[in-house]
Image: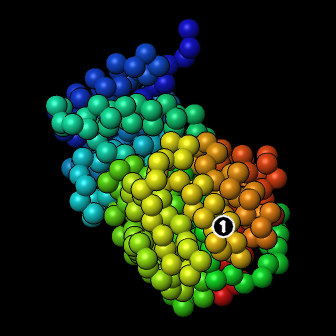
């Protein structure tokens, strides 16, 4: 018999707790081994159990989801999936703060039984738990020692992964999925507001979470971060995220072109669409494929390389999931394989 995935459900609402347990327990591959109604109770549970994954509520009395996520990742790292019942931008932004603290991803909480999207949301929860349970997470340093330790790690990583010399580009395209928000923060956090390039980004994300991600990034980056609009002329120092349910490309006049074309490889937005549009219309660019499951964008990164673009695939060691960049590397689609700190240094060197 296949070993079942052991899950700890952290949720302060008893009603939501019961629904989550029922959804997860209905799958033969998942076993809910414990529930906790507060952050304090979750930490107590972890002294006695070793779950494969934790589903984490955001708002709880006492120790909230952010504080308990930090403590877990500093002491006993476990894959954490954030579940949010709210689509308010400020609550979704809070979910991304949990991801910044070490959680893997955030999804909607399937609690509206009888609603039109309940089954789809419940399926997404189960599938996410299955996908994330096998991810190897690393210990995070407490804030008081984090800076020094990170500086040491970054110096070591850059020494092991030297920064290549590339020419300046006006357009940078980035594709990412699972683990993307943390990776994107790392590579963009030191870029100044007057950065000379425009950055186009496709991030696979759960429905309803894009607005919160934009707010989170806009608050922590010096760059301006926004949702892209059709026909918009690119501006330097700006990060354009593809809107939900659309593909994003760039036309020959350097204007954003959104599309409602069919999903590619099950994705809309798809990294493949952005990279293919650039290969056709604007191949004089820098294209970066970051952490994520599957192979979205891998073949199109190869096409960009063939047409003269500089292409970068994230290395395995710094990827949460090496599916997308790994597929690109297997195809030979990369000009360079770099870790996140080296990508960040390379982008900063082009300012």
For image coordinates 68% across by 66% down, the residue present is 279
Asked which secondary structure carries label 1, the reply is helix
Is there any visible trace of residue 108 in the rendered image? Answer: yes
Quadrant in which the C terminus appears:
bottom right
* 222 or 53: nearer the viewer: 222
Identify the image quadrant of residue 14. Answer: top left
- Sort mark 1 into few (<14), some (14-19) or many (20+) by Cα contacts within 10 Å: some
Is there any visible trace of residue 336 in the rendered image? Answer: no
How far across and down, in percent of the image, does residue 306 sit? 80, 63
Quadrant in which the N terminus appears:
top right
Colouring scheme applied when the structure was drawn: rainbow
In the rendered view, would you say 8 is above or below 262?
above
In the rendered view, would you say 94 is above or below 76?
below
Residue that sits furthest to the top in the current view? 1
In the image, taking residue 270 as reference, residue 10 lies left or right, namely: left
Q: Which residue is mark 1?
A: 280
Residue that sits furthest to the bottom in the current view? 194
For image coordinates 73% across by 64% down, the residue present is 304
In the rendered view, would you say 183 is above or below 116?
below
* 1 or 102: nearer the viewer: 1
In the image, taking residue 253 as reference, residue 221 lies left or right, namely: left
How far across and down, in percent of the image, does residue 271 sit? 57, 56
């Amino acid at each position: 018999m296949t070993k079942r995935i052991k899950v700890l459900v952290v949720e302060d609402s008893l009603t939501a707790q019961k629904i989550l347990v029922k959804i997860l327990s209905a799958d033969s591959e998942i076993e809910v081994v414990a529930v906790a109604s507060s952050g304090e109770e979750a930490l107590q549970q972890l002294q006695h159990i070793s779950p494969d994954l934790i589903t984490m509520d955001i708002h709880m009395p006492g120790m909230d989801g952010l504080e308990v996520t930090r403590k877990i990742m500093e002491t006993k790292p476990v894959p954490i999936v954030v579940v949010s019942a709210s689509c308010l931008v400020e609550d979704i932004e809070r979910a991304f703060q949990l991801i910044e603290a070490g959680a893997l991803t955030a999804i909607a909480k399937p609690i509206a039984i009888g609603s039109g999207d309940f089954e789809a949301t419940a399926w997404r929860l189960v599938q996410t738990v299955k996908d994330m349970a096998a991810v190897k997470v690393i210990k995070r340093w407490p804030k008081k020692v984090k800076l020094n330790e990170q500086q040491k790690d970054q110096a070591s990583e850059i020494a092991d992964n030297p920064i290549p010399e590339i020419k300046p580009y006006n357009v940078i395209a980035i594709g990412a999925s699972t683990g993307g928000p943390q990776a994107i923060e790392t590579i963009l956090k030191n870029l100044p507001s007057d950065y000379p390039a425009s950055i186009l980004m496709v991030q696979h994300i759960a429905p309803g979470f894009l607005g919160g991600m934009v707010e989170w990034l806009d608050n922590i980056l010096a760059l301006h971060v926004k949702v892209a609009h059709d026909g918009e002329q690119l501006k330097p120092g700006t990060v354009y995220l593809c809107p939900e349910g659309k593909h994003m490309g760039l036309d020959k006049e350097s204007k954003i072109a959104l599309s409602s074309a069919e999903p590619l490889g099950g994705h809309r937005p798809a990294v493949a669409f952005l990279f293919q549009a650039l290969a056709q219309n604007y191949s004089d660019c820098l294209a970066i494929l970051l952490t994520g499951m599957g192979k979205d964008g891998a073949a199109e990164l190869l096409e960009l390389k063939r047409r003269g673009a500089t292409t970068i695939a994230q290395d395995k060691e710094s990827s949460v999931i090496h599916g997308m960049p790994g597929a690109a590397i297997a195809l030979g689609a990369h000009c360079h394989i770099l870790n996140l700190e080296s990508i960040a240094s390379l982008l900063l060197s082009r300012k």
